[in-house]
Amino acid sequence: MSGSTEAEIEAAAVTTALILEITAPVNTFYLLFAGTLVFFMQVGFAMLCAGSVRQKNVKNIMLKNLLDACGGAIGFFVCGYAFAQGGGGNKFIGSEGRWFFLQDVSLGADYISWFFQFAFAATAATIVAGTVAERCKMEAYLCYSFMLSAFVYPVVNHSIWNGDGFLSCAADPRPIFDIGMIDFAGSGVVHMTGGCTALIAAIILGPRQGRFHDSDGNVLPEPATFAAHSVSLQVLGTFILWVGWYGFNPGSTLGIIDGTGAYADQAGLCAITTTLAASMGCVSALFTDTILGIVKTGEAEYDLTFAMNGALSGLVAITAGCSVVTPWAACVIGLIGGWVYVGASKLLITLKIDDAVDAIPVHFFNGMWGCLAVGLFAEPNRTLSVYADFKHFGWFYSWGRNSGDFQLFIVQFIGILWIIGWVVATMAPFFFILNFLGMFRVDALEEEVGLDISHHRGAAYDMTGPSKEDIDELVARRATAHGKVEVPVEVTETIEQADNV
């Protein structure tokens, strides 16, 4: 009997060792895959921004998106990751020395954690690019991108996601009401931080020329609309971002094997809630804008911009609670997310705040809504599968139990106030200093000509056509070789265009 017991113990030990041997590499690959999807969102942001601006500023916005990734990587390598995920017992900021420059790191699990977290930091930084497009100096952009990735974002990350953070669900004991802020994949940590930074930058930088005022400074009766130069790039960017979100949300389980199947269950739920929220946000924003248009003008028009940004709004809104809400709740969150976008977009216009790509309504306002939605819709069983021994759930579920427990909602609200307060306290003085030093906004003539020509050695597209002389010679040759022939319509149109130049 004793031999049998020893054999069973030995077999169990071998099995456990095999599971551990398999688990670490598989989870590392899972984070590599998810992190790559998140990093690929940089392509989505680049395409969306490039399509949304006028053609005279395409090279400028593309370069800024590229440098976001580069500056974010350098800042996160130097100190950003140490501040965000480094230990040391500080509830506000990480201080563990080995994470600075990754100087004492050798395990694959540590390296892949840095890569995954870097992809999130780069996302937060690139949100601002579209908002300040067409008028922001390159040097200012580089300064703010490094500042956000190396210091501002890491502090928010540490306070909510690190086990030492003062708002963290992973803290022991949990900080407020014996719970922490639930922000599973970053509606607040990533999107609110980037969106709030964008709002501050837009206010201090001011609107583009001709957006709200004429050349004499008089207020326009209706704000000018600058047409996007490529709807195709906008749609491509939107779809790429949507795909990238499947790394953003399911990937935030930080693994796929845990021995119990919980990670796999959470990842599957995240994929479903992400899909449903995006779909509902798209439909909600599109048809809400259409209905408002019918009321105002009597005509039914369907604006593609509202459909795209509505989908992105639903994605941002579900990011905080994607692992703790039910599919039906994800539909409601996405639906309201579309409404939040429509209302916030119109609010910015009323306040004469110019956001070239509507990043502030999408990321800041829907980041707030996503955090608050957790306080309403966090379902008990799903919440406990992610956060063990959690004692407070969404208010609607507490209300259904006749308890009226509102504490999770309060903590979520406190987290929102903390993010706004920290970002404003750090980035507002930073942008004011840049503006005071004349480093923030380009010259008015450079803005009018376009940043591609004034800053990047020429336009992104070669818009020159054939000369009128060459076209006349071609027509003459055809007439001589074949007798009198009818000039093709396309050639005639080209001649007329050349005459008008």
Image (cartoon, helix red, strand yellow):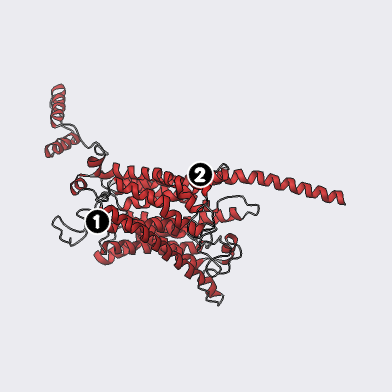
Q: Position of residue 436 (x, y in %)?
A: 25, 54
Residue 174 visible to an observer of this rendering: yes
Q: Position of residue 403 (x, y in %)?
A: 55, 77
Q: Amino acid at mark 1?
A: Pro
Q: Residue furthest right?
A: 1
The x and y percentages for residue 21 are 66, 43
Residue visible at 25% across and 41% down in the picture: 455
Q: Residue furthest bottom?
A: 402
Q: Earlier in the sequence, mark 1 or mark 2?
A: 2
- Label 1 close to label 2 by CB (< 8 Å): no
Nearer the observer: mark 1 or 2; the answer is: 2
The label shown at residue 32 is none
* Helix, strand or loop at mark 2: helix
- Total residue callouts: 2
Query: For residue 295, which quarter of the picture?
Result: bottom left
- The answer to whether residue 7 is left or right of residue 494 is right
**Residue at image location 51% in from the left, 47% down from the top:** 99
Badge 2 crowding class, 10 Å Cα cut-off, few under 14, some 14 to 19, many 20 or more, is some
Report whether 345 appears left or right of 322. left
Q: Which residue is mark 1?
A: 207
Answer whether residue 284 is visible to the viewer in this image.
no
Q: Amino acid at mark 2?
A: Leu
Q: Secondary structure at mark 1?
A: loop
On the rendered structure, is 27 left or right of 128?
A: right
Who is closer to the viewer here, 266 or 147? 147
Q: Nearer the viewer, residue 303 or 434?
A: 434
Residue shown at 74% from the left, 45% from the top: 14
Which quarter of the rendered picture does the C terminus lie within? top left
* Distance between the alpha carbons at the discs numbered 1 and 2: 41 Å
The residue carrying pointer 1 sits among few (fewer than 14), some (14 to 19) or many (20 or more) residues within 10 Å by Cα, namely many
Task: Tell me where residue 450 appears, x and y as whole percent.
Answer: 22, 44
Q: For residue 102, which numbered disc appears in the image?
A: 2
